[in-house]
Image (cartoon, rainbow, N blue to C red):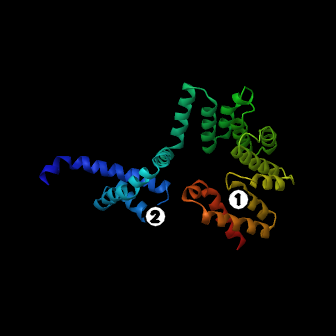
Amino acid sequence: MDALQPYLPLIYNVLRALAVIGLIHAVVTRQQVYWIVMLVFGALFGGLFGLAFAAVYTFMVLIPALRGSSRVAGQAVARGVEALKPLDLRIREAQADLAESDTLQRRADLAALQARAGRPDEAQATLQPLLSGIYADDPVVLLTSAELDLVRDQPAPAEEKLRRVDLKASAATRTRTLTLLAQAQDAQGHSEADATYREAMTAATTEEPRARYAAYLLRRGRGDEARALLDALEKTERRATALYRRQEREWFQQGRDLRKELK
């Protein structure tokens, strides 16, 4: 034990770091609550049991996950670490990246962060140079700008931009475009929103159009149709892989919330 004495501070710091990494991984991959609770103790307080759990989690969960799907697990942890950064810091970093190299993707990323921070006018200003340049008809630009229009309660300009998107670009682009278009039409009181939602659900790459259409039906007193849609969404969630459930958790959660309104 005396021989280990000089290394105890290093071992303590390593275990504390593993507790932090394990906590991020556990939250991102939605592990059991007891793992998260014990890792919180290890990360925040460094207690004996918390650090012991960090070591156990590392060998029982984290390392096997990295071995089985190192790329996916690494990306999940990286997203978790990025998500822990304050939004203002992420915006400043995105602004610095844009100043270093002004690309379409960096402008779109910065605009998305500004929109999340509740600064839609800044986000629109970030995108504005692209709307009149060579990228004016790029799906990324049109979709991002249309989303900002909807946030600013300007559905008519959003609809105009969405109608310029090439629906053949990709299945994901088609799904996102039609879903936003249905929202824009609904906001303007246009009856074709119903048909657009149905079109968005055909060969959709996400559960968003189904969840949003169910909400649309509920608002119009069409509870039986909404119930059938929500039952199908619940069935999809039960049969989905863990990865797909994590990817679509926002829309599965919305489906659960809407089912409560039906009771």
In-front residue for pair 8/232: 232
Q: Residue at x 32, y 56 (%)?
A: 55
Question: In x, y percent, where is residue 90?
Answer: 53, 39
Label 1, on which residue?
211
Left-right relation of 217 to 245: right
Q: Which secondary structure, mark 2?
A: loop
Q: Which secondary structure, mark 1?
A: helix
In-front residue for pair 12/151: 12
Question: In x, y percent, where is residue 49?
Answer: 30, 62
* Inter-mark Cα distance, 1 to 2: 26 Å
Asked if residue 127 is positioned above or below residue 174 in the image, the reply reads above
Crowd band around label 2 with a 10 angstrom C-alpha radius: few (<14), some (14–19), many (20+): few
Q: Residue at x 65, y 32 (%)?
A: 126
Type of amino acid under label 2: Gln
Splitting the image into 4 quarters, where does residue 65 fall? bottom left
Residue 258 in view: yes
Q: Residue at x 38, y 52 (%)?
A: 63
Question: In x, y percent, where is residue 97?
Answer: 54, 30
Left-right relation of 245 to 136: left
In-front residue for pair 140/45: 140
Question: In x, y percent, where is residue 116?
Answer: 61, 45
Type of amino acid under label 1: Ala
Label 2, on which residue?
32
